[in-house]
Amino acid sequence: MLRGMCTSSFYAADLDAANAWYSDLFGIEPYYVVPNGYLEWRIGDYEGEFGIVNAAYANPGQVDTPAGAVVYWAVDDVDAALARLIEKGATPYQPITERGEGFVTAAAVDPFGNILGVMYNQHYLDKVAG
């Protein structure tokens, strides 16, 4: 039934600021833009879709505080990834946590109130290596 993660969607009240922040973080511009409504990048080994939706379209109370599910993106170095997010203006949310051999997570809140997780995941690396 579930064939794979298609798009992770985050919200931002200021799409221009979100575009600048995430384009700088990813090192690329969004490939898909709906003016004043939506931005989307394809990033990573499997070109996962990362979307930013205008916060005006969020459900009431949905974007008031960081909450809900955390999407973890695979990184090679959790310490460096978390430090870069914080350097760019994100705030720490979840400290670097060893989850077992080959699994380390951390999370930060971007300047727009979204939780962005980063993870070193040995299973992911094994899959990518083929």
Image: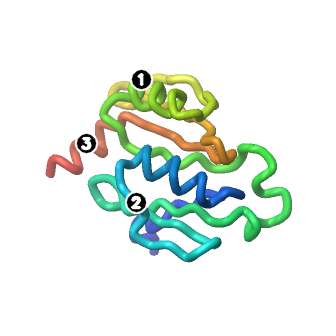
Residues packed near mark 1 inside 10 Å, few (<14), some (14 to 19) or many (20 plus): some
Position of 51 relative to 105 (above/below): below
Mark nearer the N terminus (3 vs 2): 2
Mark nearer the N terminus (1 vs 3): 1
Q: Viewed as shown, does residue 30 lie left or right of 123?
A: right
Q: Nearer the viewer, mark 2 or mark 1?
A: 2
Residue nearest the observer in this picture, 23 or 79: 23
Residue nearest the observer in this picture, 73 or 35: 35
Position of 11 relative to 65 (above/below): below
Please name the residue that numbered disc 1 is placed on: 79
Judging from the image, what secondary structure is the residue with disc 1 in? helix
Q: Nearer the viewer, mark 3 or mark 2?
A: 2
Horizontal and vertical percent position of residue 82: 48, 29
Q: Residue at x 51, y 27 (%)?
A: 87
Q: Looking at numbered disc 2 in the image, what kind of residue is underneath it?
A: Glu
Q: Looking at numbered disc 3 in the image, what kind of residue is underneath it?
A: Leu
Label drawn at residue 125: 3
Furthest toward the left, the residue is 130
Residue nearest the observer in this picture, 93 or 16: 16
Q: Residue at x 29, y 59 (%)?
A: 46
Q: From mark 2 to mark 1, how far is it between C-alphas?
A: 25 Å
Residues packed near mark 2 inside 10 Å, few (<14), some (14 to 19) or many (20 plus): some
Q: Nearer the viewer, mark 1 or mark 3?
A: 1
Please name the residue that numbered disc 2 is placed on: 29
Q: Residue at x 64, y 47 (%)?
A: 114
Q: Please report contact status of discs 1 and 3: CB closer than 8 Å, yes or no.
A: no
Which image quadrant for residue 93? top right
Image quadrant containing the N terminus: bottom left
Can residue 5 be seen here? no
Horizontal and vertical percent position of residue 29: 40, 60
Q: From mark 1 to mark 3, how far is it between C-alphas?
A: 17 Å
Mark nearer the N terminus (2 vs 1): 2
